[in-house]
Amino acid sequence: MINLDRLLGDLEELSGIGRLPSGGLTRQAFSPAELEARAWFQAKARAAGLAVRVDQAGNIFGRLGGAGPAVLTGSHLDTIEAGGAYDGALGVLAGLECLRTMQERGIGLDHPVEVVAFSDEEERFLGFLGSLALTGRLGPADLDRAADESGLPLTQAMTRAGLDPARIREAARPAAEIKAFVELHVEQGPILDRAGVSVGLVDLVKGNYRFGLTLTGRRDHAGSPMAGRRDPMLPAVAIITRIKDRFDGLSDDQALMTVGLLKADPGIENVIPGSVYFTVDFRAVQAELLPHLEGELERAAAGEAAAAGVGLVIRPLLKIDPVRFDRGILGVAAEAAREAGVEYLTLPSGAGHDAQVMGQYVPSAMIFAPSRAGRSHCPEEETSPGDVGLCAEVLLRTLIRLARKFYEDRQKVKMKNK
């Protein structure tokens, strides 16, 4: 039912905003490119006849229908530096196309449907800013502490975008106003592509514990004798190696570990650094495994730092337990896929998404589209037009079912009979 050519055209048009000569694109939250994308999306939503509003977190909503609890769908428009054209954008624009289709075909609904573009999902400042604010988990003090890597305060960036950080609590919506949330997103992994399956139904998002470690030694010339040095780089490498060795006995289905950032100060090739900072990211399906890995990291870091005679500070950056999505919504999505004649695969998500935040607040689920060769967060990120169309079609049929009272009543009967 959807107009695939129009959806693909929107994806192509949006990918021109923030486009780099290298082929990737950069639309970091509240940057000029992201603000241009936000204005572009609002114009598209208004042209589709949707009621558009922007809350004090910068979330953009396009609404179809009147009063009552709404069915929400969407994702984010911001990107990482030199990112891809599908991450986030696919979910927002497929949601827009679904609402257009409902509008144009006069599809009868009992609940309003909204498409949302969340702000700052990609962690330029805070990460999940929009969804955290919508779920009532942010106050002005949280914003006051946030800044990007250049030191630009989040509050300043929001003010420049016409928002009032002091009013961030106004972005919160009562859970009773939201019947369901469904996010379409690219997988950012190889499972669907390897299996040759076009649609993924995501049953859970792995928990994510993330830490920043600072080791402080003594800055010296690289010509200094090895004996007597207080070089923080060597224990940093030893800590990373010890934790990596721990993961040799774990499968990808159990846990993942990433060191995404390592910086030496001053970062000069002929200088022993005075300090080293690095991050460790743990992701796991089992909630109990994450605190265990945290403890192992703390023990390894304390031991290596003491042996090298350097200072150690460990700061938690993020702690989100695994989130299991609503079985009822997943059942509706599976039914929609079968009706559309589309094969689907049930799988977990290793990446974090706004649905992970929303799923702690309202009934939520995710649909995955394949990432070609598993690539994402890079210029090579790609999802085939055919897969875009099939996933958007399943999303449309899922939203229609969720917005109709018949399916709502049927789900209640199913739960009662369990």
Image (cartoon, grey):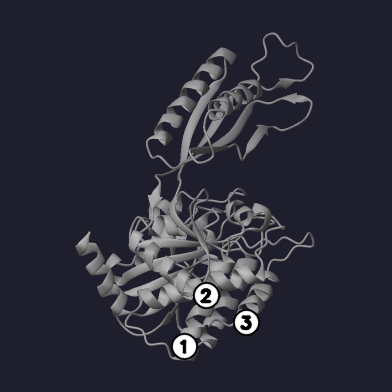
Residue at mark 3: 6
Left or right of residue 272: residue 166: left
Task: Name the N-terminal-most of marks 2 and 1.
Answer: 1
Dot 3 surroundings within 10 Å: few (below 14), some, or many (20 or more)?
Answer: few
Labelled disc at residue 103: 1
- Residue 405: percent from left, percent from top: 29, 79
Residue at mark 2: 393
Task: Name the N-terminal-most of marks 3 and 2.
Answer: 3
Q: Quadrant of residue 328?
A: bottom left
Secondary-structure class at tag 2: helix
Secondary-structure class at tag 3: helix
- Front one among 293 and 239: 293
Rounded to the nearest angstrom, the CA distance separating label 3 from label 1 is 15 Å
Task: Name the N-terminal-most of marks 3 and 1.
Answer: 3
Rounded to the nearest angstrom, the CA distance separating label 3 from label 2 is 13 Å
- For the C terminus, the quadrant is bottom left
Q: Residue at x 62, y 49 (%)?
A: 150
Labelled disc at residue 87: none
Dot in front, 3 or 2: 2
Dot in front, 2 or 1: 2
- Residue 54 visible in image: no
Left or right of residue 319: residue 222: right
Residue type, label 3: Arg
